[in-house]
Image (spheres, rainbow, N blue to C red):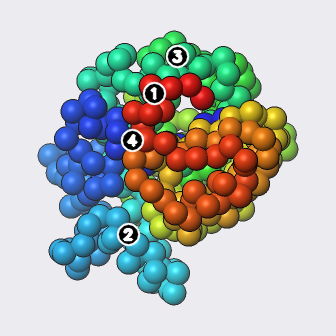
Amino acid sequence: MLVVGNGLSIGAFKYFGLRLDPSHPFSFGVPDPLNPSKKLMDTLTSMRDMINQHPDLTDFEIIQDFIANYDKNNEEHAQTHHELRQYLSLAYSFVNALLLTRWKEDWRWAQWLRKHYKRIAGIVSINYDLVLETALQQSSLGYYRIGSKEENNSIGIPIFKPHGSCDFDISSRFISIPPQNRLRNPTRLNDYVINGRGRIEIVPKGKLLEPRTESDVVLPFESSPQTQLTWVRQGYEAVSKTAKTVDALIIVGISYQPCDRVEIDSILDKISRHAVIRLVDPKPNVKFEAKLMGVSDNAKRIRPEEFFDGNI
């Protein structure tokens, strides 16, 4: 099983020369999808005003500060929260289009996926971007996202994205809002269930730069409210079953923030005591390493170069 976070995307952006940092999404220069002569930032005025109040903070620090205030008064900040979610969905969709123009098959993680594809029982990604999906697509490797219609043709690796994805939306059969009204009409956490299964819609590639009807993505530093959604609950049930069976767990780019620990621990605590666990990270993470060593007798952190040079 593979569990990936923002570190994987940072590495991919650097390798493909995008000159963009996934940790600084406000600098992406995303155009307004309804008026390409403008920047999306200038249309999302509530979010823009919030950002301008913190000129000395990084993007993630601004979001972290916002989350602290949002938790105290979510009604007052509901529009800003909505705009942040819309922005992140569109920003990472925008970047994905750039990524496709620079794709190279010799990226180490793409090579690793091709080499170990048949051994991968499942992937959990807390990223909104489509870096992982692109690596599999460009290598002609099958996958499907848990909670989507892709489950109907479940061939390949199951991918679970509990924090949402830039190409996720709620079904238009459940909620229908014209694209021109979506940026100013907050919707959130509506649960669409069909035949007992929670379902999210996959946005077609040609519409990835249109505003979402409902952009359910978990903001950085936000404890996920999405665990109440049926497709997320069912996804964790599926992942828990798989976690019990795997003989190796590879963790890439996860910082183990307090807001994410309950979700991450729900996976780790299902792993066999005898499974190999490798935390692929160039920097020490004392709390995470201690947790992993408490889970398995064969857990350790290794640097990326060690990981690619050796065997699991």
Distance of mark 2 from mark 3, alpha carbons? 36 Å
Q: Which residue is mark 2?
A: 63
**Coordinates of residue 3 in the picture (x, y in percent):** 59, 42
Numbered disc in front, either 4 or 2? 4
Which mark, residue 9?
4
Compare marks 4 and 1 and give the one earlier in the sequence: 4
Q: CA distance from mark 2 to mark 1?
A: 34 Å
Query: How far apart, in angstroms, are the residues tagged by discs 4 and 1?
Result: 17 Å
Q: Earlier in the sequence, mark 2 or mark 3?
A: 2
Query: Mark 1: which amino acid?
Result: Phe
Report the side of 247 relative to 83 (left or right): right
- Tell me what residue is drawn at x 14 percent, y 46 percent: 37
Binning the other alpha carbons within 10 Å of mark 1 as few (below 14), some (14 to 19) or many (20 upward) gives: some
Residue at 17% x, 51% y: name it. Answer: 38
Q: Secondary structure at mark 1?
A: helix
Q: Which residue is mark 3?
A: 114
Report how far apart the C-alphas of labels 4 and 3 lie in the structure.
18 Å
Q: At 21% across and 54% down in the image, what residue appears? A: 27
CA separation in Å, label 4 and label 2? 19 Å
Q: Secondary structure at mark 3?
A: helix
**Could you tell me residue 286's position as x and y percent?**
52, 63
Q: On the rendered image, what quadrant is the N terminus found in?
A: top right
Q: CA distance from mark 3 to mark 1?
A: 13 Å
Badge 4 amino acid: Ser
Position of 82 relative to 119 (above/below): below
In the rendered structure, are the residues bearing label 2 and label 1 in contact, judged by CB atoms less than 8 Å apart?
no
The extreme bottom residue here reads 72
Tell me where residue 117 sits by quadrant.
Answer: top right
